[in-house]
Image (cartoon, rainbow, N blue to C red):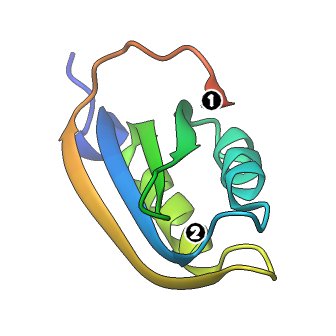
Amino acid sequence: MTQPADELSVRARILVHGRVQGVGFRAFAAHVALDLRLLGGVRNLPDGRVELEVEGQRAVIEALEHRLRIGPSAARVIKVETEWGAATGRYSVFEIWH
């Protein structure tokens, strides 16, 4: 028996632009992802963006995207970009990458 399409795991690479480094954004993103039971990680990029790689159900990742657009109070999110792909199954937790 196959799973309905909305229950299948997918992968998303999410790039968050704006004032998102040095404001607790990675901790915020990790907290939300853990609450949503997503797998993957989050890291700062040298150009000032924050990158997340997450795996889980698409609707759940879309809920994460919504929360990222708001961000923690000190952040100023300008744009959130998401690239979708097939889940790899390589993550067993969600963590902050350095």
Residue at horizontal 66%, vertical 54%? 29
Residue 77 point in image, percent of width and height: 55, 82
Name the side, left or right, on which 32 lies relative to 86. Answer: right
Residue 94 point in image, percent of width and height: 62, 29
Residue at horizontal 21%, vertical 49%? 84
The residue singled out by tag 2 in the image is 68
The amino acid sitting under disc 2 is Leu
**Mark 2 or mark 1: which comes first in sequence?**
2
Name the side, left or right, on which 32 lies relative to 83. Answer: right
The residue singled out by tag 1 in the image is 94
Residue 48 point in image, percent of width and height: 49, 64
Q: Quadrant of the N terminus?
A: top left
Residue 98 point in image, percent of width and height: 62, 32
Name the side, left or right, on which 47 lies relative to 20. Answer: left
Name the side, left or right, on which 33 lies relative to 59. Answer: right
Residue at horizontal 46%, vertical 67%? 16
Does 56 appear above or below 69? above
Extreme-front residue of the structure: 46
> Which quadrant holds residue 70?
bottom right
Q: CA distance from mark 2 to mark 1?
A: 15 Å
Q: Nearer the viewer, residue 85 or 15?
A: 15
> Which quadrant holds residue 69?
bottom right
Does 98 appear above or below 12? above
